[in-house]
Amino acid sequence: MAVVVAPQQVPIPKARGERPWGAWGLRTIALVYLALMIVVPLSAVVAEGLSGGLGGLWHDLNKFSAQGALFLTLWTGAIMTVINVVMGTLTAYVLVRYQFPGKALLNAIIDMPVAIPTLVSGLMLVILLGPQEVIGKWLDAVGIHIIFNWPAIVIALLFTTFPLVVRAVQPVLEELEIDQEEAAYSLGATQWQTFRHVMLPALRPAVISGGLLTFARALGEFGSIVLVAGNLPGKTLTAPVYILGEIESGSPRSASAMSLVLLTISFVMIILLDWLQRRRMARRD
Amino acid sequence: MSVVVKNLDKKFGSFGAVNNVSFEVQEGELAALLGPSGAGKSTILRMIGGLEQPDTGTIELDGVDVSRMSPQQRGAGFVFQSYALFKHMTITQNIAFGLEVRHVAKNEVRERVRELLNLVKLDGYGNHYPSQLSGGQRQRVALARALAPRPRVMLLDEPFGALDARVRVELREWIRRLHDDVHVTSIFVTHDQEEALEISDKIVVINEGNVEQIGSPSDLYDRPATPFVASFIGPINVFKGEAAEGKATFGHMSVPLPRSMEQATGAVDVFIRPFDFFMSTEGHDGRGVEAKVQRVALIGGSVKLSLVLFGGERVEVQLDREHFGSLDIEVGEEVWLTPKAAKVFSKAHQPLA
């Protein structure tokens, strides 16, 4: 006969002593801070962007300059993300798996683009590639126009986002035992087969989250782009630069409309990133 | 498929990990590289597999020098202590990997995987992931994966190292049976002398990057070439003594020197295995020495006694249980010990007996 034992009523001891006010106080401070610093400004932009209703939003965005800017931001961001994912993964692999002189220095330099003000990054590229400079003059002469053209946007973005993929992939690679690679080699797999079938599956979540982070960062990049690309509508005017232009010409609603679009895209990416990270955590063991 | 290693040298920085190592493993043999941790055994195995490059020396597989070949070209199956299974692949995919990278036909792969799952007694586990298996099962998958492309030689690096004691013993007995079925030339690395003695045909004892001795388990046990081998293979008592007039004398005991070294004099070390003592309750012929029983431990079919000689030296003696019973000894009693066999090494580490 099955014996059913009634769950006993055990008084739950108060966690962390008798200081409920302390704990709630901390939570309240954190939540209020979050609301003031993030939720309220976000709501303000959303409210402003939608102040003319959905029709108004559509009207604000249905302009050649707005759509061109958004489109330019998306496709340059996409190209750059692909390059960064490939090169960032490669860099991380080299940093983890090979020994060479200057490795420690390189490892330290990788984070520089994040620490440098983006305007300074832009300035560096202008100095390097500008039409009056040696390299720029030579490139101009052979018919390659980088500065004030879309390649400048891609290069500026590559520079400012370079660490994001490297730093996402590197720790995962470090954790990956070399045994698995060696096992693959001894089973007859080529280096490429080993990378493709053994390492990449293990790295994929990190590569994807690094890529998403890169793209999200690219959507908002302003400082470096405004110097190297200029603001030709439909040609070199990116969405963040467009927003500045709209504010300066006194149409905050139009600026908010574009902001709303960028916000939505970023939000989707962050949700995706979060979901990916949760899945990776759940898969461990 | 034979393996011949000649004058292998490998330095890591200024540390000589492997020094002038040479040995041969015959077709179909199961050989052990035995030595303490850090002795260089794994480095030797990795060099045979092509995972590490020797500084000098050659490795021949079936008479072909493979020293400069990549691991892919050597056709050696490698099994790691950590299993090194591909975590994102199922057991089937793991075993099939070595065949698929060689573009073996799909139905052939399926047939071979089925055959191997059966061989390693994991039928029905094909769709599991490595994380769902126990340590012993994972190591069997690693074996099946290494066997799949029909390697010319199997290299196992501390294959039982990460397993708990009972599984270790089971798995090593199973590996010996598997080897008798599959008969692929195999070399495994271990620091456990019991493991090496139990399952290998040949043992290469490595110490500090050097080969100490090569031989069958009974060779090493009965005829150790160096004091290191004598003390590493199986328990042994070591006494400091003097050689003179054809005898090695230690404490109140003495053993005859071998005929070849009858003239030797000076300090020697005398090694006597716990089983190589004759024990009685009364003295006889003047060769024996008195000792006091301190501890008696029953170990399965034999009895281990710890004794103290009158000089204060400790001695471990092992007797079979029947003999022990007939002596009727208790802790605290005094007995007579006579060495039946001994290995004598001079200080220059020359074996004298």
Image (tube, rainbow, N blue to C red):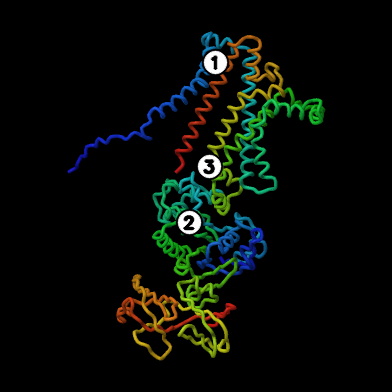
Give the image location of residue B84, x and y in percent: 51, 51
Q: What residue lies at 67% left-to-right and 28% top-to-bottom?
A: A117
Q: Secondary structure at mark 3?
A: helix
Residue furthest front in the image: A18
Label 2: which residue? Answer: B143
To the question of a shared chain for discs 3 and 2, the answer is: no
Secondary structure, mark 2, is helix
Mark 3–mark 2 Cα distance, whole angstroms, equals 22 Å
Q: Secondary structure at mark 1?
A: helix
Q: Specify the amino acid type for callout 1.
A: Val
Q: Quadrant of the N terminus of chain B?
A: bottom right
**Which residue bears the numbered disc 1?**
A45
Question: What kind of residue is marked 2?
Answer: Leu
Task: For residue B102, say whether it is visible.
Answer: no
- Please indicate whether residue B329 sits to the left or right of residue A78 in the image: left
Is residue B303 visible from the viewing direction of this image? yes
Q: Earlier in the sequence, mark 3 or mark 1?
A: 1
| Residue type pointed to by label 3 | Ala
